[in-house]
Image (spheres, rainbow, N blue to C red):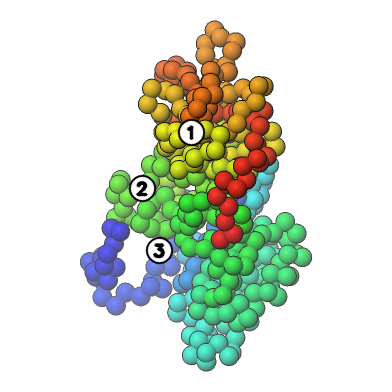
Amino acid sequence: GPCPDIGKIMNQTERPNFAYQEFAPRFQAELFNATEWSEVFAQAGAQYVVLTSKHHDGYCMWDSRSAVPTTWHWNVMDVGPRRDLLGELASAIQSTHSPYHNQEKLKFGVYHSLYEWFNPLYLRDRENNFTTNDFVTLKTIAELKDLVEKYKPEIIWSDGEWEASSDYWKSRDFLQWYAKTVETGVWNDRWGKETLCKHGGFYTCADRYEPGHLVQKKWENAMTIDKTSWGWNRMSSFEDYFSTQELVHTLIQTVAYNGNLLLNVGPSADGTLNPIFVDRLMGIGEWLAINSQSIFQTSPWDVCQDEAGQQSEHYSSSPIAEGVYYTRTADMLYIHLTEWPTGSTIILSCPQPSKKTEITMLGYHQPNEMETALRYEINHHGVEVELPRLTPDVIPCQHAWVLQMTHVDNLDGYERSRGKLSSE
């Protein structure tokens, strides 16, 4: 990344012996507007928003003063903005409707780090080989319960679990309580050093997790728009940000393999979102405005998730269609083309059309023509689809194009053994 030597940067930009805690008074969030944030996230197509309530430094982003005395002078009300930033965002998110996905309200969630780098209570428990758990009782569980009781988050994204077991963190007891308190609540897999990728409502397995194949358990790819940083990095250059096209392609692949995408943006200390982040979010939203039905309320297609390397017994060896990913609903197959094929024809080896099959492109309407169905033929290679000539006046979207196929004979199987199933 662009910050290989933090110590060197700090020596250049701060006085000698500058302490980490001295950053807090500079954090003012004076331009933070929770409603603006929630509107940006809704327009981007987000269905849930997760705010960092506390990272490994222990600083609490909500009004934790009365419920958790051990957060004294290290929370958003005592030092810094003196505003309940998490509370403001929770309220805004929970009252914002998605323009997609049946106009449902967005879900609000919290990221929370179990452990803390510098907390003497934690360091003492660790020195005692976790035979004591004063830190968990006085801080971790008290914080989690306060967050749940005050803000009713529907996602708890736990982290910082890896040094101690879930018994030390009292995770099981807390999650049983949480499930009763917020009946719609879900949680991830980071609740003890033995739980990652094994126990949880959904799996995260690693930051930027991309299994590259179908995983039967719901999973999530938590990744950053800035390739080098989870926070706002002044030293990041234009090349350090993923393009909208890269992010749309990642979204498509993730959903095809049964994942969700948790896309991180790092706000500035003044509470604003950098325009590059907003540009990428709006770009994803523009794509979803045309193609959301192929993403939301769909499932992976068990038969075939992508064309790469598929060789069907129904067709002889065919040219591999690169960058093609499938999703499905109860009666529809969606085919995502992340690359435009040479000659504007594409050969699909996975679907088996019936006599009633129709293929259309989402968002495509040819002027002065009633018929929007695309021409296709079945030959010894597969289903050869003739794509429309997408001149600038009729192109439905950028970055990727989605075909909708009706009455697919093998939508519900016939070739289950060919699906790349995994229990990982």
Count of numbered marks = 3
Expressed as whole percent of the image width and height from the top left, the position of residue 44 reads 53, 40
> What residue do we see at 55% from left, 58% from top?
51
Where the C terminus falls, by quadrant? bottom right
Mark pair 3, 1: CA separation: 65 Å
Q: Nearer the viewer, residue 324 or 19?
A: 324
> What residue do we see at 57% from left, 56% from top?
422
Q: Is residue 336 above or below residue 85?
A: above
Q: Indicate which label's residue lies in the foreground, 3 or 1.
A: 1
Q: Nearer the viewer, residue 205 or 14?
A: 205
Q: Earlier in the sequence, mark 3 or mark 1?
A: 3
Q: Indicate which label's residue lies in the foreground, 2 or 3.
A: 2
Q: Indicate which label's residue lies in the foreground, 2 or 1.
A: 1
Q: Is residue 85 left or right of residue 147?
A: left
Expressed as whole percent of the image width and height from the top left, the position of residue 30 reads 47, 54
Expressed as whole percent of the image width and height from the top left, the position of residue 112 reads 56, 66
Q: Which residue is mark 1?
A: 316
Q: Which residue is mark 2?
A: 241
Q: Is residue 342 visible?
A: yes
Q: Amino acid at mark 1?
A: Ser
Q: Which residue is mark 3?
A: 26
> What residue do we see at 44% from left, 17% from top?
389
